[in-house]
Image (spheres, rainbow, N blue to C red):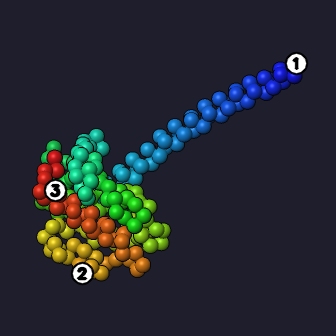
Amino acid sequence: MKSQPIIKAGFLLFIFTAISIFFVSLAQQSMKERIKHNEEQLLIQRLGELVKNYDNNILEDKFSKEITLYGSKQTINIYPAKRNNQVFAYLVEHNYPNGYSGSIRLLTGIDSNNQLLGVRVIAHKETPGLGDKIETKKSNWIEQFKGLSLGNPTASQWKVKRDGGRFDAFTGATITPRAIVTATYQLLTYFSEHEIK
């Protein structure tokens, strides 16, 4: 007789747990979709900062490549910008693994002459107040890459000033700027030696 209340309580606990799991997984799925939507909106914004006057659906025309970059294999996403059905620029989404606090997800624009349209950060974990100055909302530091190429500046100048190069670093944060400069130079070098397509 005494076991009936225990069985009833166990059954109610089971029902409550099952319902809780259902709602938690529902909320988690909803959050995943919202996060994906927010990431896509940020990507669209970054694409628009680097290239204008394209007439194709740049997101639908995206293609991916598996390449060895920065010493390891990674899948990069490439967004071709077209005008009158002719590609005039590529926007390359890639991951540089050696930031101060881990990987930095970048979007780099390269025109048909292998000249930089610019570089933008999509995601990072760099130190707030120091390394996060790579974001356009924090500083204009990252805008200095526009118009550069492998020959401008020379190979020896593709470094931060502390390493004898041309690029400024942030006070108290050299590793993050060094990472962006290195990532940009190595990506340009890769695509000077390989087809982007």
Residue 161 position (above or below residue 15):
below
> Few, some or many C-alpha atoms within 10 Å of disc 1 (few <14, some 14-19, many ≥20)?
few
Q: Which mark is residue 164?
A: 2
Whichever of callouts 2 and 1 sits on the residue coming sooner in the sequence is 1
Q: Position of residue 19 (x, y in %)?
A: 66, 30
Looking at marks 3 and 2 on the same chain, the residue that comes earlier in the sequence is marked by 2
Q: Amino acid at mark 2?
A: Gly
Mark 1 vs mark 3: which is more N-terminal? 1
**Which residue lies at the image location 26% right of the left edge and 67% below the top edge?**
182
Which one is closest to the eye, mark 3 or mark 2?
Answer: 2
Q: CA distance from mark 3 to mark 2?
A: 25 Å
**Which residue is painted at 75% across and 27% down in the image?**
10
Numbered label attached to residue 64: none
Residue 172 sits in quarter? bottom left
Find disc 1 in the rendering and name its residue.
Answer: 1
Mark 2 or 1: in front is 1
Q: Amino acid at mark 3?
A: Phe
The residue wearing badge 3 is: 191
Q: Is residue 188 above or below residue 56?
A: below
Which of these two is toward me, 175 or 63? 175
In front of the other: 115 or 25:
25
Q: Position of residue 141 (x, y in %)?
A: 34, 72
Residue 160, quarter of picture: bottom left
